[in-house]
Image (cartoon, rainbow, N blue to C red):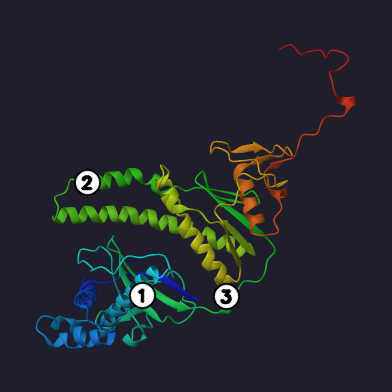
Amino acid sequence: MQLRYSFRVYPSAGQRAALARAFGCVRVVYNDALRARETARGEGAPFPKTGDLSKQLITAAKNTPERAWLGEVSAVVLQQSLRDLDAAYRNFFDGLKGKRPRMGAPRYKSRKDTRQSVRFTANARWSITPGQKLRLPKIGDLKVKWSRSLPSVPSTVTVVKDSAGRYFASFVVETGPEEVLPETTPEVGIDLGLGHFAVLSDGTKVDSPRFLRRAEKRLKKAQRALARKEKGSSNRNKARIKVARAHARVADARREFHQLSTKLIRENQAVAVEDLAVKGLARTRLAKSVHDAGWSAFVTMLEYKAARYGRTFIRIGRFEPTSQACSQCGVKDGPKPLHVRVWTCGACGAVLDRDVNAAVNVAKAAGLAVSACRAQVRPERVPAPRSKAGTHPTPQPSKAR
């Protein structure tokens, strides 16, 4: 499977200027190609092919005074811009055909976009130098902060500038079966929530970190300062970067916390989760907390890491009554309000923790070999024997204090 590894890069002032030129050229070629295709569609003409657009908008345009500056950047990144437009159209039409979720039609890129990127393929002859720097054509050798080693030789590299003004190098690498982990015995069901981020079928509870809630005070201060700045001013741009950096710190902390997915995949042979309606929950009064939890990203990580390491990932339907059925006897006891965290089964009398019971039911619905004996469940109360029932025959002396 293909994986993407991102590393922070630190370009010099001249390299930042060269990257800015590359970002601008890529944006112009993309917009020119999109304009040509929209014009052809409006006139009823045939859809222009990528090869024809490449000759017209790149090769021929470099010889004109208006687009001569396209020659200052690598031709590979300009070609990749046209391929990106092809992918945008393909995704749009596949959404109309029902082959994938619906997406909007391709839109023009703005020079005011705070996120910019360029992609270099092997044809660009980029390389990693013996000094562990990233050498890019017509840009130079970029200093890279290597946090780990790449598992194989990367096929492409994308240089990204995010909203906070940081630069990253994103490598695409191919991995094989050598990363498959040895088989293990445990299998686990996971119940995702807001009070606890995750509750496992073995009774383990992972607290919700609430990164956005903890950073709200700092974010409010930065956003108020941004709102007071005059639009178009240099101070407003500085305030915008401060807001973007505050949000980036929250996103980075959440991404770091989601390494929990690696731990779960390594320790369990099979993992089962419930298919949550995140978009529906995000339209309720719990929207901020739902987005702060990042369930979708966490489940996506579980899925691709299970495929990478040879584990089993199961997603059960969202309408499965995991919170209504007793994990001991299987009797459905009906829906319960959210404030009810512990309930007693009316059939077998077991006292059940709502979240642990749901996690056990998620595992059982997925067909995993999980029992509720390790969960937080109290057995049914048994009446005392007749010989031990009742009061003592003689009153017991009380101790005065």
Residue topped by disc 1:
90
Marking on residue 245: none
Residue topped by disc 2:
225
152 vs 62, left or right, is: right
Residue located at (24% from left, 64% from top) = 113
Residue located at (72% from left, 46% from top) = 328
- Label 2 to label 3, Cα distance in Å? 48 Å
Residue topped by disc 3:
179
Residue located at (42% from left, 80% from top) = 154
Q: Earlier in the sequence, mark 1 or mark 3?
A: 1
The residue under label 2 is which amino acid type?
Ala
Q: Earlier in the sequence, mark 2 or mark 3?
A: 3
Secondary structure under tag 1 reads: helix
**Pointer 2: residues within 10 angstroms few (<14), some, or many (20+)?**
some
152 vs 384, left or right, is: left
- Of circles 2 and 1, the one toward us is 1
The single residue placed furthest to the front in the displayed view is 44
Q: Is residue 166 above or below residue 48?
A: above
The residue under label 1 is which amino acid type?
Arg
Decide if residue 132 is in sight here: no
Decide if residue 9 is in sight here: yes
- Label 2 to label 1, Cα distance in Å? 42 Å
**Pointer 1: residues within 10 angstroms few (<14), some, or many (20+)?**
some
**x and y percentages locating residue 118 in the rendered image:** 29, 75
Q: Is residue 266 above or below residue 159?
A: above
**x and y percentages locating residue 359 in the rendered image:** 61, 51
198 vs 97, left or right, is: right
The residue under label 3 is which amino acid type?
Glu
The answer to which image quadrant residue 379 occupies is top right
Secondary structure under tag 3 reads: helix
